[in-house]
Image (cartoon, grey):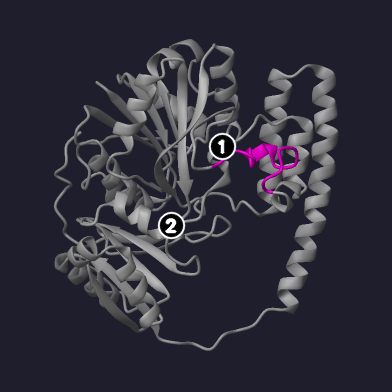
Amino acid sequence: MKLSVIIVNYNVKYFLEQCLFSVLKASRNIETEVFVVDNNSSDGSREYLEPRFPQVNFTWNESNAGFAKANNQALAHAKGDFILFLNPDTILPEDCFEKSIAFLDENKDVGALGVHMIDGSGKFLKESKRAFPSPATSFYKLAGLAQLFPRSRTFARYYLGNLSEKEDHEIDVLAGAYMMMTREALDKTGGFDERFFMYGEDVDLSYRIQKAGFKNFYFAGTTIIHFKGESTQKGSLNYVRLFYKAMSLFVKKHYPGGRARFYNFFIQTAIWFRAIISALGSIFRHINSTHPAEVVQQTAVVSNPEDFSFVSGLLQKKGLPEKYLHWVNSETLAKEGPGQLSEALSRNDIREVIFCGGEPGFKEIISIIQELPGELSNKFHASGSSSIVGSNSKNCGGDYIADENNLVKPSSQSV
């Protein structure tokens, strides 16, 4: 077995459906096994996903075991030479696994890698590369100084803002959204520390990888979509508290006592500062809130004829507000390039694009959305799936449209 892919699910069945379609495509040329551990979802994930993906190894927990423990459940059965911990709210390009494995094969001193990640609107996600949370580094991040000075070697160290996102770099922390490890590194470090329930487990494992004598690398040679809005809202005070709790556990585990106390002082100060900023921001947004007039949505569908028929039928069946649909034939797009799409969007004042991952594939789609205007709302539909998903911000939940009664055939792709 070359690769074991492990995904933990919690109430995101439509996003996971799209993720699994992309995983199966990326696995075509690699001997791969896929594990999904569900943490007692209440959204009908089992009834929806199991019939559609008979080739996936599902585990259905009767309680929420947390991210770390659920990953370890699957890890105990994984046989791959490489292990990928993957979030369910991701979409992968078709050559993602091949490129990642090739990099690890060529660099034997690297124990694990993360990749270039973007959100649903095509914007780079800074957490693709991070440093370990020293007291000062964490304070700058939580106080907002990293956001004010995004390229600073000092203030933006948490996200290593001084390092180019377009180049490979040795880094400290790998994001748990896409964390590929060698079997050798895992045998020396073990899996995730189950004391971390949410957040921080990837930081802890990254630290132990380095302690075991391996390097962590940010690999810029492939790009994935990570929607992110499907977990705790990253801008909320609740997220700050959860983040602090996880980082505090990390420091107590790995840093000397005096340094841990110093760290806690800085973090508590940052939390109060962030709370004040958050409260002022809420008041400002409330005072300046407006209610725009309703308009008919202009939507482009990039697809082959079969997928366009499904998408337009689904929108009509769901009784959504009227949309004026523009069809961009994916075959024409492949011949004429993304410039043709940009011209069509501008000419027709289109604000939303639904990309269907058949032809072009997700690799081409991921490349295209990074070149399109950031104010567009992008949604995604894998050919053969029963849903459309999208999320344009890490600070809010995603959107989805689905037909659970659509009698699609189980995915025929093998792993």
Residue at 58% x, 50% y: name it: 232
Query: Can I make out residue 291 in this image?
Result: yes
The crowd level at tag 2 (other Cα within 10 Å; few <14, some 14-19, many 20+) is: some
Helix, strand or loop at mark 1? loop
Left or right position of 287 against 172: right
Q: Which mark is residue 370?
A: 2
- Magenta span contains residue 400: no
- Magenta span contains residue 163: yes
Q: CA distance from mark 1 to mark 2?
A: 19 Å
The crowd level at tag 1 (other Cα within 10 Å; few <14, some 14-19, many 20+) is: many
Q: Which residues are magenta?
A: 150-164
Left or right position of 414 against 79: left
Query: Can I make out residue 65 in this image?
Result: no
Residue at 75% x, 78% y: name it: 287
Q: Amino acid at mark 1?
A: Lys
Quadrant housing residue 384 = bottom left
Does 356 appear above or below 29?
Answer: below
Indicate the position of residue 199 as horizontal and vertical percent values.
Answer: 59, 37
Q: Amino acid at mark 2?
A: Gln
Indicate the position of residue 125 as horizontal and vertical percent values.
Answer: 53, 48
Marks 1 and 2 in Cβ contact (< 8 Å): no
Closer to the chain start, of discs 1 and 2, is 1
Residue at 40% x, 45% y: name it: 224
Helix, strand or loop at mark 2? loop
Q: Which mark is residue 266?
A: none
Q: Quadrant of the C terminus?
A: top left
Indicate the position of residue 245 as horizontal and vertical percent values.
Answer: 70, 35
Foreground: 280 or 150? 150
> Label 1, on which residue?
129
Quadrant housing residue 70 = top left
Quadrant housing residue 140 = top right
